[in-house]
Image: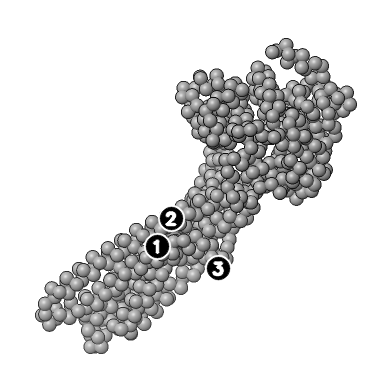
Amino acid sequence: MSTDTPRTAPAAADAEPPQPSLPARKTWRVLYGHIRPHRAAIALGGLLTLVGSAAGLVQPLAAKALVERLGVHESITMLLVLLTALVVAGAVAEAVGAYVLERTAESVVLAARRQLVARLLRLRMPAVDRSKPGDLMSRVTADTTLLRAITTQSLVSAGTGLATLVGAIVFMALLEPVLLGVTVAVIVLIGSSMGLVMPRISKATKRAQEAVGAISTALERTFGAFRTVKASGAERREEAAIEAAAREAWRGGVRAAKWQSLAMSSVGLAVQVSFLAVLGVGGARVASGATDIATLIAFLLYLFYLIDPISRLVEAASAYQVGSAAIARMAEAEGLETEPLETEPLEAGDQEGAGAATPAKPASIAFEGVTFRYRPDLPPVHHGVDFVVPGGGMTAFVGPSGAGKSTVFGLVERFYEADGGRVLVDGTDVRDWPLERLRAQIGYVEQDAPVLSGTLRENLLFAAPGATDDQLARVLTRTRLDGLVERLPEGLETPVGHRGSKLSGGERQRVAIARALLREPRLLLLDEATSQLDAANELALRDTVAEAARTTTVLVVAHRLSTVTLADRIVVMEAGRVRAIGTHAELVASDPLYGELAATQFLATAPDDRANQAS
C-alpha cells in the first residue's frame, strides 16, 4: 500500500485540541446569529409566559381583598371567581408559551445542525486530517442539543423572570416597604454566593462536553476497525479507553450537577430565611398596629411567589454557563477552513461524462515545478514535480512508498493545494477551475476503496445518481460484479453493511471501480485499485481499465507492476521527484530503480506473454 497520504496525520489527530472558550460578548453574538430567524416566535412565547406570570402577580392582591372582606363579612363569591379565572388564564398562557418556546428551541437546534453539517462536509482535507471524526460528530449531536436550554432559559426565562421579579418587588414595596427591605437584605446576602458558583458550572460543563467528544472519538475508532480489535484481542483495552472517557464525562456532569444543585438550593434557602425574617418582623408590626394581617398575608404570598422568578434567573445563568461551552465548541468547528462554495449549482449537462450524448474529450494533466508539504512542520512531499500527460491513454506512477505518488491524485482533485508550481487540467490551473465542475470530470478510486453503509445500488450510484439501468448493467458486466449481484439475496438492493463489511476486499475494490466508471469521467484516477483482487479478476480489470483508456485519461498508482506494464507511459517517482518517464521496456533498460522494482517482482521478462497465455 502506498503511504503518500499525511504520514503523521494520526499523531496530529491524537493531539489534544485546545479547550475552546469565547468571551461573553462573542458568545451572545454567535447565539443571536442562531436565534435571529426565530425572533418572532421567541417574542410570542416570551409574551405568553409573561402574561401567565402577570396573572400570578395579581393573585396575592386578590387574596388580600378576600381576607379583608371576610373580616367585614362581605360576599367573596366574585373574588373567588376572579381568582379562579386568573389561575386558569395564567396556566393556559404559560402552557402555550412553554410549547411555543420549546418548539422554537428545537427549530434552533435543527437549523444549527444543518448549518454545522453543511460546513463540516465542505472542510478542506488538512482540517479533517487535524481533527478527530468522533469529536466533530459530537459537536453536531451533543453540543447543538445544548442550544435548546440556552435558547429558552438564558433568553426567555431570564427576561420573563426578571420582569416578574421586578413586578413582584413593586407590589411588595407598595404593600410594606419595611418588610421588603428585610427580604432584599436576606436574599442579597445569600445570593452573593452565586458569583462563585457560576464559573465552576461552566468549567465542569466544558470538561463534560469534551469527554463526550472523546467517547465519540473512541467509539468511531473502535467500530471503524472492529475486526482488527477482535483479532488483536483488544476488546478489554478498548473498553477501558472508552470507559475512561465515559468516567471523565460522568465526573464533569457530576461536578456541574453539584454546583447547579448548590445554586438552586441557595434560592430556596434565601426565600425560607426571608420568610422567617418577614414573619418575625411582620408579626411584630401587626401586633403594634403598623400594618394589618391581610397585608402581611399578601406580602408572604408575594415572598413565596419570588421563588419562581429567582429560580428562572438562576436556571438562566446555569444554562448560559452550560450553553456557552457548547457554543464555543460549535464556533470552533465553524471556524475550520472550508472549500469554496459554488455560487451556481452544477447542472446535469455540465458533467461531461455520466451518460453524455457525445463522448467526452479525455482530460490532459500537467505538473509544473510542483512543491508540496502536508503541514508547515512536516518535510516536503514534492520537490519540484514535473510531468505532462496528454489526453487519453494510461499513465502509471510507480516508485517506493512515500515517493509522492498518491499525493499527485490529491493535488489533482484539489484535496490539497500545491505550495509552489502549478497543477494543470486541460491547460488550466486547478485553482482556477470551479471546484465542483473540476471534480465532476474525475472518477477516483482510493487506496482502501471505501464502501458506504447502504445498499449495493446506492454505492454504485453514489457518484452518478442519474445513471440509467442500462449503464449500470454494462458497468456491472465490465467489472465482473454481475455474478455477485446474482448471488446476493436481494440483488442490488442488498445492504452491504458498515463500510462494506458484508463484501470481501476484492468485491469492495470492484464496487469502487464500478462506481468510478459509472460516472464516465474524463479523467480516471486509480490508486492501488487492484491490490486485493485475485489473478482472474485482476486480469479482467486490467482489460476494463485498458478499454476505458481508449476514451478516458487513466492515471494508475501501483506497487504491483503487473497492473501497469501495459501503460502508454510510466512515471517513476522517488523522494518527491520524477526521476524517469517512459514505457516498461524503455525503463527496464534505462532506469536502475525501475529495473530493480521490475526484477524484484519478476516482471522483467515478457509479462504480456503471461497475460496472453492466461487469456
Toward the right, the furthest residue is 590
Give SS at disc 3. Answer: helix
Q: Which residue is mark 3?
A: 25
Lateral position of residue 573 relative to residue 193, left or right: right
Toward the front, the furthest residue is 358
Q: Residue at x 61, y 41 (%)?
A: 350
Instruction: Find the distance from the CA under tag 3 to the CA under tag 1.
Output: 24 Å
Instruction: Find the distance from the CA under tag 1 to the CA under tag 2.
Output: 10 Å
Give SS at disc 1. Answer: helix
Q: Residues within 10 Å of mark 3 (few under 14, many from 20)?
A: few
Q: Residues within 10 Å of mark 2 (few under 14, many from 20)?
A: some
Observer-side mark, 3 or 1, equals 1
Q: Nearer the viewer, residue 34 or 250?
A: 34
Q: Position of residue 125 (x, y in %)?
A: 66, 45
Q: Residues within 10 Å of mark 1 (few under 14, many from 20)?
A: some
Q: Quadrant of residue 385?
A: top right
Q: Are marks 1 and 2 in contact (CB under 8 Å)?
A: yes
Q: Position of residue 258 (x, y in %)?
A: 45, 59
Q: Mark 2 or mark 3, which has the lower sequence index?
A: 3
Q: Are marks 2 and 3 in contact (CB under 8 Å)?
A: no
Q: Residue at x 28, y 83 (%)?
A: 175
Q: Amino acid at mark 1?
A: Ala
Q: Which residue is mark 1?
A: 41
Residue 107: which numbered mark, if any? 2
